[in-house]
Amino acid sequence: MKMEEIRKIAQEKGIVPGKSRKADLIRKIQRSEGNNDCFESGQADRCGQTKCLWREDCV
């Protein structure tokens, strides 16, 4: 997913993207949704969240 799309999602959730890196911004979004902030943590094969919006970029 492109940064423009990620920034838009963040703003829709009330998160100010600022100059956040892609991974940091996605983790902020994950936390705001009440999910584990596991993006790019090396756990994609164990997380079990196959429907995660970020899965394609994570693995």
Image (cartoon, rainbow, N blue to C red):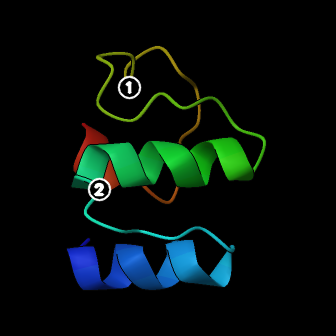
Residue at x-position 53% and y-position 42%: 50
Q: Where does label 1 land, which residue?
A: 44
Residue at x-position 24% and y-position 74%: 3
Q: What residue type is labelled 1?
A: Ala
**Mark 2 element type:** loop
Q: What residue type is labelled 2?
A: Ser
Q: Residues within 10 Å of mark 1 (few under 14, many from 20)?
A: some
Q: Please state the total of marks drawn on the protein image.
A: 2
Q: Where does label 2 land, which residue?
A: 20
Q: How crowded is mark 2: few (under 14 residues within 10 Å), some or many (20 or more)?
A: few
Q: Where is residue 13 in the image (x, y as percent from the top left)?
A: 68, 73
> On residue 57, which mark appears?
none
Is 22 displayed left or right of 13 in the figure? left
Q: Residue furthest right?
A: 34
State whether residue 35 is above or below residue 53.
Answer: above
Is 59 displayed left or right of 27 in the figure? left
Q: Of marks 1 and 2, which one's residue comes earlier in the chain? A: 2
Place residue 5 in its image quadrant.
bottom left
Q: Where is residue 16 in the image (x, y as percent from the top left)?
A: 51, 70
State whether residue 30 is above or below residue 4.
Answer: above
**Mark 1 element type:** loop
Give the quadrant of the N terminus.
Answer: bottom left
Residue at x-position 64% and y-position 84%: 12
